[in-house]
Image (cartoon, rainbow, N blue to C red):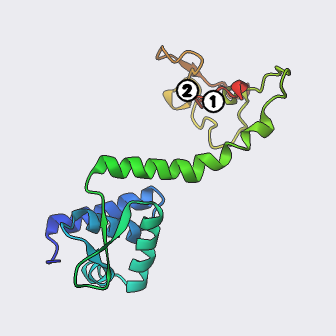
């Protein structure tokens, strides 16, 4: 691969920064960005040389990207090394990452929800999260004076209106969560 243009360098660096904000290792995101920009599949040594990253770090990054199913191995005629490529369609990348996150983060929690569901025939209502009081000093507790926009929470009972309910300092407060757990 020829030397990177300044625009490509900025894109790769920016993609690495965005990756850290999404909880992905910076090098993993940079390897993905390089493969996204590359018109041909690249082998690990070429990726390592282009990004000035250790070969072992590139191998680990490629393994991680393969685990997310957004990078695949390609064989090139006349070369015994594994070459790697990624989707060039942003929507395909988004769809694959969304499916993988669902598989890793949401699907494992679904069997456990039955543990908290009321027994059949027992219609006891599980309180929704916006009906539970906030503890003072919690991450969701108001930090500024009453009546300000900073300590107002959306009224989740009436999503059709853009109404706001002011949180009172010592009383029960609604918490925006968007789910009613009474349906479990």
Is disc 1 surrounded by few (<14), some (14 to 19) or many (20+) residues within 10 Å?
A: many
Q: Quadrant of residue 132?
A: top right
Q: Residue at x 36, y 66 (%)?
A: 72
Relative to residue 19, is residue 9 drawn left or right? left
Q: Position of residue 151 (x, y in %)?
A: 56, 30
Relative to residue 127, is residue 110 drawn left or right? left
Please state which of residues 151 and 158 is positioned toward the viewer in this rendering: 158
Q: Position of residue 119 (x, y in %)?
A: 85, 28
Label 1 element class = loop
Q: Spatial distance from mark 1 to mark 2, Cα to Cα? A: 10 Å
Label 1 belongs to which residue? 175
Q: Position of residue 64 (x, y in %)?
A: 46, 68
Vertical placement of residue 95 versus 62, above or below: above
The number of numbered badges drawn on the structure is 2
Q: Which mark is residue 95?
A: none
Vertical placement of residue 56 versus 35, above or below: below
Label 2 belongs to which residue? 152
In the rendered image, the quadrant that contains the N terminus is bottom left
Relative to residue 110, is residue 96 drawn left or right? left
In the rendered image, the quadrant that contains the C terminus is top right
Label 2 element class = strand
Camera-side mark, 1 or 2: 1
Is disc 2 surrounded by few (<14), some (14 to 19) or many (20+) residues within 10 Å?
A: some
Please state which of residues 176 and 137 is positioned toward the viewer in this rendering: 176
Q: Residue at x 39, y 71 (%)?
A: 27
Vertical placement of residue 123 versus 144, above or below: above
């Amino acid at each position: 691969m020829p030397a990177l243009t300044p625009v490509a360098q900025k894109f790769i660096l920016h993609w690495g920064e965005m990756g850290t904000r999404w909880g992905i290792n910076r090098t993993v995101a940079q390897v993905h960005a390089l493969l996204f920009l590359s018109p041909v599949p690249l082998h690990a040594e070429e990726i390592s040389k282009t990004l000035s990253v250790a070969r072992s770090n590139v191998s680990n990054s490629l393994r991680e990207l393969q685990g997310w199913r957004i990078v695949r191995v390609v064989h090139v005629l006349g070369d015994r090394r594994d070459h790697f490529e990624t989707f060039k369609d942003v929507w395909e990348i988004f769809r694959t990452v969304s499916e993988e996150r669902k598989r890793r983060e949401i699907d494992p929690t679904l069997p456990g929800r039955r543990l908290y569901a009321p027994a059949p025939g027992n219609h006891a209502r599980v309180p929704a999260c916006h009906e539970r009081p906030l503890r003072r000093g919690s991450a969701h507790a108001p930090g500024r004076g009453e009546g300000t926009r900073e300590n107002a929470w959306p009224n989740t009972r009436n999503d059709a209106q853009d109404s706001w309910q002011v949180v009172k300092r010592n009383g029960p407060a609604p918490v925006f969560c968007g789910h009613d757990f009474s349906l479990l």
